[in-house]
Image: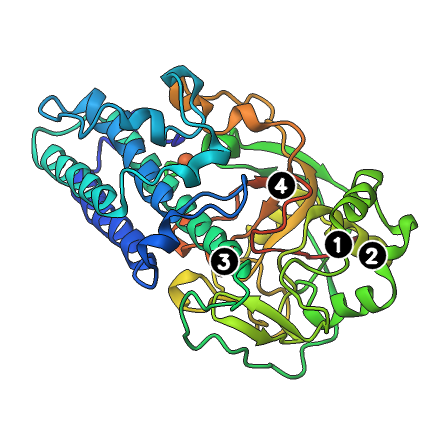
Amino acid sequence: MPLAQPDSFEHRPNRAEDLLVRTRRVRSFSLQLIEPLSAEDCAAQSMPDASPAKWHLAHTTWFFETFVLLPHSTGYRAYNEAFGRLFNSYYEALGARHPRPRRGLLTRPGLDEVLIYRAHVDRGLEDWLAGPAPAAAALDLLELGLHHERQHQELLLTDIKHLLSLNPLKPAYRASGTHPVVIAGHTHQTYSAGPTGRCDIGHGGADFGFDNEAPRHSRWLQPYALATRPVNNAEFRAFVEDGGYSRAELWLSDGWSTVQEQAWCRPCYWDESLQAEFTLGGMQAIDPTAPVCHVSYYEADAYARWSGARLPTEEEWEAVAAGHPLAGHFVESGLQQPRAAAGDGMRALFGDVWEWTGSAYLPYPGFAPAAGAVGEYNGKFMANQMVLRGGSCLSHSDHIRPTYRNFFYPDARWQMSGIRLARGV
Ligand SMILES: [Fe+2]
């Protein structure tokens, strides 16, 4: 849920108009993302963790219908009440739902009908926002829905990438200017001391934040230094060539078990040569200076141990990031792969790759999920997952902020996840 105080937006008379513009922008971006895809591409599911593009399009629509229109728009009628069973993701309070691993079996409704469903809900949102001023709490839910759709846009891309990677022809999602441009002179890893002592972290402003980012609170930071850029492909290749995947002493026990079970020997999309990788633009030469991506927490942790460093805690990461502008390669850049950041000093904190932290995904002191079904959004996942920070080149910049906490299981590596090192000083 948004963290705005209940009356924090009351003095903003144009909030509904602002949200209408943003709603059109966010909803149309989802349709842009499927332009390179066929109906068959949109229907397939490559693994239980991933969802078909068609399901993402329908589920984000269901979210607006369920949490915004049905409870708050008196004239709205559900497009098809049976869709709740198909497109509810994990909200137990809303009843029975189709099992996640079988979303790829939902050949009906077809893509055409899902697009009609989207248009029906879009019209409902337009009519609602054009009517009598909606309550601030209802607009908060609309804003939550927009950020929710931003999350699913990134998942749509990472899920499509995984799907296409399993095709022997290694087709491109979108052939674009994704060929890496190697930026010379940025291969030397340096560290910079971060803020220490009492630091306030978490979201506390009137602008949007998910409930898991609050409350803002104090942490005490011992002296530490953060690497000035993410680990790059050349550095990670050195880890692979040094036998990193065959040295048990570098790995957490669960990580080592996963290496054995999954036969991991390199990042998710690298080929055996360690010189090429599958990207949304098809197979491409690995850019040695670009941030390594598609590594799990276990791989990030093992790499850090091999290099004599560690992963930053999420409070260390945020204390540093809070002092930096939100600049980086985001999805609007058209890049489909991370790219080395030019310049000196601390860079690429935002965009390019999500950065694994060494912090377990736990509630902040005083965390309180929202009442009702929407309270299931974040809080119930606070076990056995690790926090990632900063967004990626597949995140939209209007969705990322220094306090944003992403989270995945430690063996997940189909997201654009990379590594930034830290160490004590
Ligand atoms: Fe969702």
Nearest-to-viewer mark from 1 and 4:
1
State whether residue 190 appears in this view: no
Disc 3 and disc 2 in contact, CB within 8 angstroms = no
Disc marking residue 264: 1
| Disc on the earlier residue, 1 or 2 | 2
Image position, residue 401 (x, y; %): 47, 48
Q: In 3D space, how far apart are the residues under numbered discs 1 and 2 (Cα atoms)?
A: 7 Å
Q: In 3D space, how far apart are the residues under numbered discs 1 and 4 (Cα atoms)?
A: 22 Å
SS category of the residue bearing label 1: loop
Q: Residue at x 43, y 22 (%)?
A: 375
SS category of the residue bearing label 3: helix
Q: Residues within 10 Å of mark 3 (few under 14, many from 20)?
A: many
**Amino acid found under the numbered disc labelled 1:** Trp
Q: Quadrant of residue 422?
A: bottom right
Between 250 and 10, the residue placed more toward the observer is 250
Image position, residue 279 (x, y; %): 53, 66
**Amino acid found under the numbered disc labelled 4:** Val
Task: Look at mark 2 in the image and give the residue it sits on.
Answer: 245
Task: Look at mark 3 in the image and give the residue it sits on.
Answer: 161
